[in-house]
Amino acid sequence: MGENLRGQAVLGMKWIGAATIFVFAINLAQNILLGRLLGPRDFGLIGMIWVILGLAQLFADSGMSNLLLQRQDLTPRQTATIIWLNFAVSSGLALLCWASAPLIAAYYREPVLKELTFWAALSFAVAAVGQPFRALAQKQLRFPRLAAADLLSAAMGFGLAAWLAWQGQGVYALLFSSLAVSLVKTLFVATLPGISQLLQPVFAWRELRP
């Protein structure tokens, strides 16, 4: 049993390590290409938005993913409750950021931020919702699937960003690329057999309180 777990852990490290190298290479190529196709203002607008969303990220998961990883005695009802709780918190924070879009635009004196904040908040919500599923995949040692999700999402994000930038879509190339990466990562892991079944229509707050 111990040798089997050790072997799976080593194999997982190899998968994740290889994926990290390839994702880094893809992201580097994307940054170089977009640096040529987009202007400084496009990157500046994204930076303005993520100053706010970065704060929201600190509260989105609230330690729920760590709880899924560390506790070995969680029941299916408790696991489902954690997933739904994370969904509620993430969605609520995304809606709060979206509602704050007029204030963000007024502060930076950039009216276009009202629309951009919606897409950025959506990308943030999708990524946050996927965190418990990634934690469950790690707990089940599904490292090849996690590595595949990282590689596929990075490749699709790069392709979409390059095409939109080439079409002259400016800052939307960055926004939709980020949204595509978050969506592919979340769906690729959430649909895993053994994980998708855990998403039951229950919310057992009393069982989760301890």
Image (tube, rainbow, N blue to C red):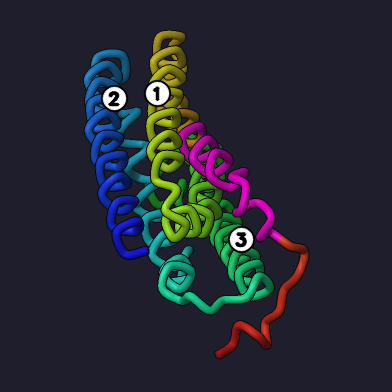
User: x, y (%) of residue 60?
Assistant: 48, 63
Q: Amino acid at mark 3?
A: Phe
Residue 200 magenta-drawn?
Answer: no
State the extent of the magenta-drawn residues as a range. 180-199
Residue at (46%, 16%) from the top-left corner?
164
Residue 194 magenta-drawn?
Answer: yes
How many numbered marks are there?
3
Task: Give yes or no for contact between labels 2 and 1 (Cβ–Cβ under 8 Å).
Answer: yes
Residue at (37%, 48%) from the top-left corner?
50
- Of all residues shown, which one is farthest toward the right? 201
Residue designated by label 1: 155
Residue designated by label 3: 87
- Of all residues shown, which one is farthest toward the top? 167
Query: Which image quadrant: the C terminus?
Result: bottom right
Q: Amino acid at mark 2?
A: Ile
User: x, y (%) of residue 64?
Assistant: 48, 70
- Of all residues shown, which one is farthest toward the bottom? 210
The reply, left or right, for residue 190 in relation to residue 177 is right
Task: Check disc 2 and report its element: helix, strand or loop.
Answer: helix
The reply, left or right, for residue 146 in relation to residue 188 is left
Quarter residue 205 falls in:
bottom right
Relative vertical location of residue 173 with respect to residue 95 in this rendering, above or below: above
Residue at (40%, 23%) from the top-left corner?
155
73 and 35: which is toward the camera: 73
